[in-house]
Image: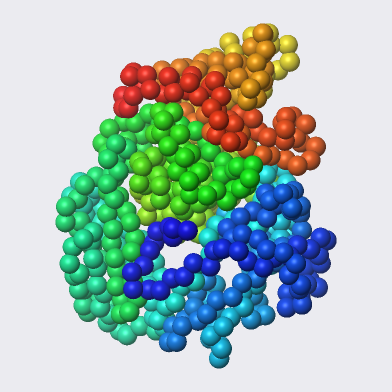
Amino acid sequence: MKKPFPRHFSRLVEELNGTWDFTFLHGCDLEKLDPTRVTYSDKMAVPAAFDATPRYAGLRGTAIYRTWFQTQPERNARLHFEAVSMWCQVYVDGVLLREHDCGYTGFWCEVPAAESPNRELVVVVDNRFDFERVPLHEEYFDFYQWGGMIRGVWLHHVPESFIESVVVTTEDWKAGDFSAKITLQGPLPEKIELGCVLDEQPLQTYAGLLPFEGRVQLRLQVPNPKPWSLDAPHLHTLRVVYGADDIIVRFGLRDFKTDGPRLIFNEKPIMLKGFNRHESHPQFGPALPEALLLNDLQQLKDLGCNFVRGSHYPQDQRFLDLCDELGLLVWEETLGWQQNVKHLTNEKYLARHKTMVEEMIAASINHPSVVIWGFLNECTSQDVACRPAIQAIVTQFHQLDPSRPVTFATFRGVADVCQDLVDLISINLYPGWYVPGGIEKPLETIPEGIRKQADYFAEKYPHKPLIISEIGAEGLYGWHDAMNGFWTEEYQAEHLRTSCLEALSNDKVQGILLWHFSDARTYAGGYSLGRPRAYNNKGTLDEYRRPKLAAKAVRECFQLPAFESSR
Ligand code: ADA
């Protein structure tokens, strides 16, 4: 599997992905579990969601994975897990090294030295819901919560002092000016020397640098700067060398910002057109093979999109790398779905959310494609008791990354009391779908439904851009009837056509994200009674990415010359 950025040239990084020993325990008492006394009865692929495989489909419990690795002389071993869902413990040679409890963010594990280079790695993974142990995941979310080592695992061999991260901040996107914040780990002398290689240029040495708390900041310039745009997504690389260690980051020179009620991309107003997308497939769950990631991206572009929302969790880094390469703007957000006052006033929950924000930003900050940070989809932002938490989360984003606008999708309409806190107003609305009984012509309610909310928010927050972050209707693949009623492909296509045309021609709206790209598995239990097949069927494509009639309708609207790019 191709390693996502950052990459390395001198540092040895080994892929631990592949087939691991595996066993699954029902009803396991985690307090009493001794992972050194487990019998491995099966095999499991890494990355994969075990509960998406036929043998373990839909099961909730404890999965134990095992593999081996070797340490190198004079090098420390660090394990990087890109995502383990939902909760896990990592053991090396029977010793617990760490726990992690967000299924969609990456984390590191330092491996202590040992006499023998042969090391046993055991990962205990649990996908049971438990607010005390794993507060970020909830069963009531309208998308299936999978279990397993769902993204890659990498073994890094590093010297005693090594480069932890390089964060690139563009200072002048046209001139190619940027700063690189380099964080080092391990003992450091008072002054250090770093090497930098920009694109294919010769190595430049920077001597006499004074690290402060392990950090150095360099101001650099790309020799032949080329901007990153949707049609020409040029990327630059920076390799930083410290002693025997190195790290290669990739970045793009672009400018994305809010300007009063407009969104500005590389100096021009932009209308965002795209989809919400779940990482979901019947056979792979959230662990999509690269071919499928690329296929999704190509289909998004073919539908005329310039934007995708990674709903509702931090994204697979391989997908973001592809968005960088192919030129697609991304909204990345933390895991969340209708969290309420119970969550947003709970200290443990908020502390975990804070860690998730840190992990998401650390992984994604260098992607030029990521232009908006989001959090907590549809939280109870009509409740003043939630304001302090929402304010704290926005502040955290701004502190960690002042360069990107921050938002969350609200469906509270006029009752929302938190939109003053965000940089960009994002509204979810479902006129023409969730309609009161008795409405005879639901499609006709769409234009007014959009207009009413747009007018309200534009008047209340005239200096903030407004986008429709969700709108859509269900259409069952292959379902047609003479009345073109609810659930038919025809109804869905007409719904999306009406929604797109209304939103794109409304001057108060700066973007539309349709709900959603492809059908995605949802609740396992009673809630799925409102979701035929236990899928959220509002996909413009079905779960195998077969286009419904809506695909043609959306493509036609998104490619209309009037809405082609800027306005
Ligand atoms: C919400 C939510 C989505 C999905 C959608 C729907 O707005 O944000 O995740 O559940 O509704 O299909 O009803």
Q: Nearer the viewer, residue 183 or 109?
A: 109
Residue at 67 percent across and 49 percent down: it is 52
Above or below, 22 relative to 345: below
Number of marks in the image?
Answer: 0
Tell me the residue at 27%/40% (across/down). Answer: 232
Q: Residue at x 65, y 25 (%)?
A: 476
Q: Is residue 55 above or below residue 294?
A: below
**Left-right relation of 42 to 296:** right
Q: In the image, is 419 to the left or to the right of 99? A: left
Q: Position of residue 556 (x, y in %)?
A: 43, 19
Residue 143 point in image, percent of width and height: 66, 41
Which residue appears at 55% of the width and 15% of the height? 494
Which residue is the extreme one toward the bottom? 115
Up-down: is 106 above or below 159? Answer: above
Left or right: 118, with 7 as reference point: right
The C terminus appears in which quarter of the rendering? top left
Q: Is residue 202 above or below residue 501?
A: below
Viewer can see residue 104: yes
Residue 171 placed where, x, y %?
25, 53
Q: Does the rendering let one see residue 131?
A: no
Q: Nearer the viewer, residue 107 or 403?
A: 107
Picture coordinates of residue 293 (x, y %)? 48, 45
Scheme by which the image is coloured: rainbow
- Quadrant in the rendering for residue 87: bottom right
